[in-house]
Image (cartoon, rainbow, N blue to C red):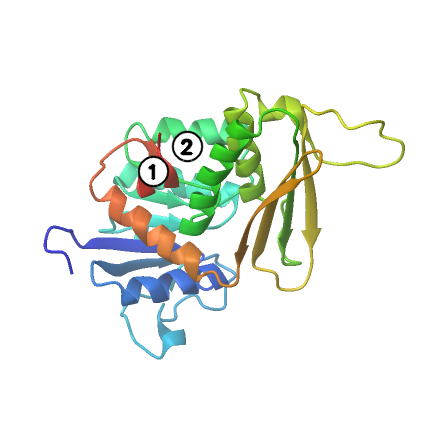
């Protein structure tokens, strides 16, 4: 343990879900964090059980549907839930002075603005994908887009498990945003999300998106830069949610030194230009 690194008291939303359990396991293994709260929906059969029971270990932290109870004495809430739930959690976190790591996707522009406004009081790290590898990939895409600004058609292809409810994925949209920004465009004006029938020739200024849903695919993302005589593919594939959990813990460590402000994983990883 780094003696200069403070110990963070962390709560996890969606504690009995796949991502929640991965986060709890990662927190337990970290020597600079302690699990201090576990939150889930009132309908969850895990309510009242010990948050680390699935690991065969008693943490003394019970999973609860009482948000204020779960956040008592907590420094940071890690939230990978749904937009409506995250915004409700945000309101109470602001009241209690709890910082947030938000991995939830599917927010509207208005909801994102609400989160950014809250970050003026208490620090928030929000990213559609907490994976260190994905965020390094985003940096590579920024570099590639600037170098391949002319003569290359850009397509984003993503694949996820059958249970994912939003499309394109938040990560795919972030990839599109990074590329569009590097090209001096607005993704809202150049994104194409569907093609069917007689579509005409491809507009070279557009960024296309293709979505695949099936099985238990954790998350695959490929950006294709298709030129004349060559094509470049930049791909990231996730085989486990562990990478999301480890990235989230890096965000928690970052927040220990930032009392307020809106941040993303580029800030956490020092990738900001």
Q: Is residue 42 left or right of residue 160?
A: left
The x and y percentages for residue 109 are 53, 28
Mark 1 neighbour class, 10 Å CA radius: few under 14, some 14 to 19, many 20 or more: many
* Camera-nearest residue between 88 and 113: 113
Q: Quadrant of residue 246?
A: bottom left
The x and y percentages for residue 161 are 63, 58
The image quadrant where one finds the C terminus is top left
Q: Is residue 110 left or right of residue 60?
A: right
- Tally of numbered discs: 2
- What is the spatial separation of the Cα atoms under label 1 and label 2, in whole angstroms? 8 Å
The image quadrant where one finds the N terminus is bottom left
Q: Is residue 15 left or right of residue 228?
A: left
Residue farthest left in this picture: 3
Q: Which mark is residue 115?
A: 2
Mark 2 neighbour class, 10 Å CA radius: few under 14, some 14 to 19, many 20 or more: many
Q: Which mark is residue 88?
A: none
Q: Quadrant of residue 86?
A: top left
Residue sitting at x 67%, y 40%: 230
* Residue 212 visible within the image: yes
Residue hosting label 1: 124
Q: Secondary structure at mark 2?
A: helix
The x and y percentages for residue 44 are 50, 63
Residue sitting at x 68%, y 27%: 206
Q: Quadrant of residue 119?
A: top left
Q: Secondary structure at mark 1?
A: strand
Residue sitting at x 50%, y 26%: 182
Residue sitting at x 26%, y 32%: 260
């Amino acid at each position: 343990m780094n003696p200069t690194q403070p110990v963070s008291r962390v709560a996890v939303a969606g504690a009995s879900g796949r991502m929640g359990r991965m986060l709890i396991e990662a927190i337990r293994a970290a020597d600079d964090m302690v699990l201090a709260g576990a939150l889930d929906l009132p309908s969850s059969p895990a309510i009242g059980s010990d948050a680390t029971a699935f690991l065969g270990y008693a943490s003394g932290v019970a999973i609860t549907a009482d948000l204020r109870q779960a956040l008592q004495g907590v420094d940071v809430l890690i939230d990978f839930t749904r937009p409506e739930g995250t915004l409700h959690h945000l309101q109470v976190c602001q009241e209690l002075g709890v910082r947030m790591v938000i991995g939830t996707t599917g927010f509207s522009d208005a909801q994102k603005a609400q989160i950014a406004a809250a970050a003026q009081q208490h620090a928030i790290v929000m990213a559609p994908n907490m994976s260190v590898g994905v965020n390094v990939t985003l940096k590579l895409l920024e570099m590639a887009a600037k170098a391949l600004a002319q003569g290359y058609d850009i397509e984003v292809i993503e694949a996820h498990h059958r249970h994912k409810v939003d499309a394109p994925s938040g990560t795919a949209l972030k990839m599109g945003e990074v590329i569009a920004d590097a090209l001096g465009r607005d993704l809202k004006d150049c994104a194409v999300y569907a093609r069917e029938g007689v579509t005409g020739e491809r507009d070279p200024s557009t960024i296309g998106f293709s979505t695949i849903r099936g099985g238990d695919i954790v998350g695959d993302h490929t950006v294709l830069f298709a030129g004349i005589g060559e094509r470049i593919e930049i791909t990231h594939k996730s085989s486990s949610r562990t990478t999301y959990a480890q990235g989230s813990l890096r965000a928690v460590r970052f927040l220990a030194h930032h009392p307020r402000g809106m941040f993303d994983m580029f800030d956490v990883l020092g990738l900001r230009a």
